[in-house]
Image (tube, rainbow, N blue to C red):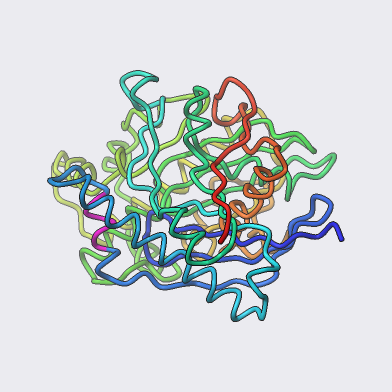
Amino acid sequence: MSEALYVGLMSGTSVDAIDAALVSIDRGATTLLATYLHPIPDPIRQDIKALSCAGPDEIERLGVLDRKLGALFAAAALELLGRADTPPGRVTAIGSHGQTIRHRPPCSAQSARESFSLQIGDPNTLSEHSGITTVADFRRRDIAAGGEGAPLASAFHAAAFARPGIRRAIVNIGGFANVSLLDGSQLRAGFDTGPGNSLLDSWIHRHLGEPYDRDGRWSAGGAVQPALLEGLLQHRFFRRTGPRSTGREAFHMDWLDGCIGEQTAVPEPQDVQATLAELTALSIARGIRSGPVAVAEVYVCGGGAHNRDLMERLARHLTGAQLESTASLGMAPDWVEAATFAWLAHQTLQGLAGNAPVVTGARGTRVLGGIYPGG
């Protein structure tokens, strides 16, 4: 049998849960078989958020949290397999993205030598607790080769969604947003476009106590503030071209508060939410329109695919392009990222490249990640 089973694990900047996906990879085709959303206990969530910013005793806190997350990722994988009635012994490997604690790529670091990206969730603990070979730490080899280490999903987007003769964009709207531009079977470009849901989630949580803006109802009822939007767009990230990636280090609540403080009048909180939604949609659309491919189709994955207001704003900025979620291509939008890291684990074990230099800016293709044999 050529079919192999893999588990992909992903925890994003929202830190709300671990996405766990069981996939089969057969003759290059990746198929979702089962999915599971594993909760992250609130104390661990708070530890992650605290460690994502500079603070005291970081090495001690990181070491402890690294082990805790490794065990939690293992629990997520085993729970997924139990629900899918799949023995761990049938799984070739787990591909674990881990939890990003810091991302300082070449495009934002003072020099290439000072660039790094750090994901925790100890793969030794994960493989020991699950008994399954684990592939992890995917980003750092690309950075060592001069790349951004992100977005890594573009290579998978090309493998899963590219079709001869069709020009399309795959947009992932998670905490941050990225696009992959496909010209037939060729991946022509991929890059982060800026904030996705991260600022939207943080702002509504501050003012309404909600974890996210369901269907974009709150932003839909607000009015975009042109002066504030223009101020947000002055961020230097939006002036970058070529390979680029970003994260909470660049777009965070202190930055947003500073931009709001520069306004002549303080806008209403709901209007700020509308402006943040417009920022996300506009920056994605500008990224697509400025790319080397005039796309006819745009497919969205990630949590943003469920934000009706965000999708409507995106449609207005992408007039003339067909806009749908990746469900139309056969893969539910919530699970594309987890499937990506299952696929990357397969690439690593096969000795195949996982990065795309046209996206990350690396000096060439590289086999990504480290392999941690199962018990």
Image x and y of residue 5, in percent: 71, 62
Q: Is residue 184 shown left or right of residue 141?
A: right
Front residue of 112 and 202:
112
- The image shows residue 25, relative to residue 44, as above or below, that is above
Q: Residue at x 22, y 41 (%)?
A: 255
Q: Residue at x 54, y 68 (%)?
A: 77
- The image shows residue 5, relative to residue 364, as above or below, that is below
Q: Residue at x 37, y 42 (%)?
A: 247
Image x and y of residue 198, in percent: 36, 54
- The image shows residue 131, relative to residue 199, as above or below, that is below
Magenta-highlighted residues: 46-51
Q: Mostly what secondary structure, the magenta segment?
A: helix
Residue farthest front in this picture: 375
Front residue of 281 and 68:
68
Query: Residue 66: which quarter of the image?
Result: bottom left
Magenta stretch holds residue 329 = no
